[in-house]
Amino acid sequence: MLTHEKIWLAIDRLANAFGYSPSGLAKQAGLDPTSFNKSKRHSPDGKPRWPSTESISKILAVTGATMSGFIALIEDENEDQRRAILTMNKDDIAKRTAQILLDTKSVLFNAREPFTLKSGRSSPVYIDCRRLISFPKERSFLMDAGAQLLSHEIGADNIDVIAGGETAGIPYGAFIAERLARPMIYVRKEPKGYGRMAQIEGHLSDKGSPKAVLVEDLQTDGGSKKIFINALRDAGAQVEHAFVVFHYGIFPASAQNMKDMGITLHALATWWDVLALAKEQNYFDAETLASVEAFLNDPESWEPAQKEGAP
């Protein structure tokens, strides 16, 4: 049942989702800034005042949300989580993200039998962000936090489309696009060899230069993003921002690559956040933690600890 309280609640939730106050949303939609003030939701004699269908239509138009999406906000069971995220600063979000990565075993530490990364480098740490998509509760927090981060740091008006990078960025792109009520596309690493020979899948508007945010699961030094960013720009999109769940945060080349490409990177957590939490909670033995810290400070010269009995 659509009660007076639920309709106003949906308006408040829509405003929060796009980084506005209720009055800010009203102003953005061309309405009187006081239209959605709490003091105007009841008449002086206490009778409920309902928002007009015209005002609801205007806020849906300015945010790009649909009526079905608006109704979903009324029934949203995750709203308490989203409200909590609004009170969290970036450090709080990073710590919660680190906890999720450890709890879901999406990050692993092993100083004596290190992992071999794609680059061929030995590493005492390994992260698998793809694993996170199998944990709905934890995934929900991460994507709510990501959507809120982008709304706050970029602004809803500066996001026209969300672009997932093949392949790990596709699910995260879809989750973020759904929360921001934005169109979603995905970008291939290279054009497919048949049909339309498309490198971008989905519909990218050809009106003006749509502002696209590239979404991937993680970033090491950021060099691989150049393929996706160039493809989007060649298709006429403006690309100034990228989002990842996890940023290594240990390679100087990452900051330089982003600067060279004209990209601002937004991330929920780094290896430093994971290490800090692992230390705080004694997740691993002291030797492992010390070796991991040595790697994070100087990954180029890090060497694995010798096994017992080794010469």
Image (tube, rainbow, N blue to C red):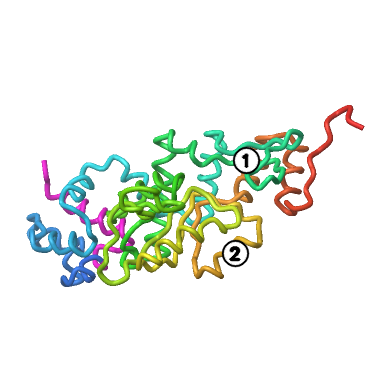
> Looking at the picture, how far across and down is residue 107, in whole percent?
59, 39
The secondary structure that dominates the magenta segment is: helix
Task: Indicate the position of residue 24 as horizontal and vertical percent values.
Answer: 26, 68
Q: In this view, does 54 lie above or below 287?
A: below
Q: Mark 1 — residue?
A: 126
Instruction: Give the side of residue 48 with respect to residue 122, left or right.
Output: left
- Looking at the picture, how far across and down is residue 95, in whole percent? 54, 47
Give amino acid for label 1.
Answer: Tyr
Q: How crowded is mark 1: few (under 14 residues within 10 Å), some or many (20 or more)?
A: some
**Residue range corresponding to the magenta coloring:** 1-24
Question: Residue sitting at 65 percent across and 35 percent down?
Answer: 283
Quadrant in which the C terminus appears: top right
Helix, strand, or loop for circle 1? strand
Check if residue 204 falls in the magenta segment: no
Amino acid residing under circle 2:
Ala
Sequence-first tag of 1 and 2: 1
Residue placed at 31% from the left, 59% from the top? 18
Report which residue position mark 2 lands on.
255
What secondary structure is marked by label 2? helix
